[in-house]
Amino acid sequence: MTPRRTRFYLDKQNAKFLGVCSGIADYTGIDALLVRVGFVLLNFATGFFGGFGIIAYFVVAWIADSKPRELDYEDREDRRFWQKVRARPGTSIRDVRASFRDIDRRLADVETHFTSQNRRLADEIEALR
Amino acid sequence: MDAPVFIISIVAILAALVGLPWIVFHYVTQWKKNASLTVEDENLLDELHALARRLEDRMGTIERIVAADNPGFRPGLRQERDQDFELTRPDEREMQTSRPRRRDQ
């Protein structure tokens, strides 16, 4: 199975126990502490519901793979990008297009600057003749 | 058995057997619709994202070089605007964002 950016993985690097909560945090972008506290509170609120939450935790830990090394993020921006891809792929694709357009605009700015400056230089030379 | 108890139990059973799966499947289909990126799409997006970031870095370098050589040149300041924290004073920022499109006058 090829490693994928949009699949759920256990996050063993930031794990407290088996890495399920940190995996959820890594997948969704919600803070890991919030996920853990929410999980515990949900278990208490449902009166452990026949141990369902805890069983679910272990089942997830057993089924899900731990995160492969090649999917490590380069930096925080990269992590945020992929979290957004998982939540709304269409929006992130448009974001990438927007950044390309921004680069295009800035390049055009530099180009305009140079060409207009040379134009002025040419006018000055013309005036000196 | 009382009539109200009977009605309540019927409603509860219906909610558990019909309502709950309905909600679950509703969200499952929504999630499936969202996660429609194929492996190729994902690799392509990865590549494009990396390319965009590299180009943005290079663009920043070029803008800095040009700005160093030509004092009249004010580079586009998207990166600065997108940052969560502010390094410049508000009045400075206003000047930068309301810069003219063409700088040759």
Image (tube, coloured by chain):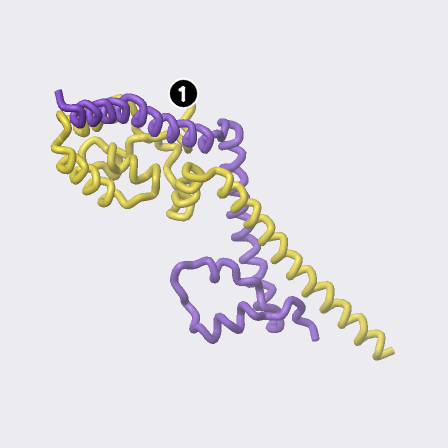
The answer to whether residue A107 is left or right of residue A46 is right
Badge 1 local density, few (<14 within 10 Å), some, or many (20+)? few
- The percent coordinates of residue A84 (x first, y second) are 42, 42
Hey, what amino acid is under mark 1?
Met
- The percent coordinates of residue B11 (x first, y second) are 25, 26
Residue at x 58%, y 58% (from the top left corner)? B62
**What color does chain A have in the rendering?**
yellow
The answer to whether residue B34 is left or right of residue B9 is right
Residue at x 76%, y 72% (from the top left corner)? A120
- The percent coordinates of residue B83 (x first, y second) are 43, 59
Q: Which residue is mark 1?
A: A1
- Which element type, helix, strand or loop, lies under badge 1? loop
**What color does chain B have in the rendering?**
purple
Q: Specify the quadrant of the image occupied by residue B76.
A: bottom right
Q: Specify the quadrant of the image occupied by residue A88.
A: top left
Q: Is residue A56 above or below residue B65?
A: above
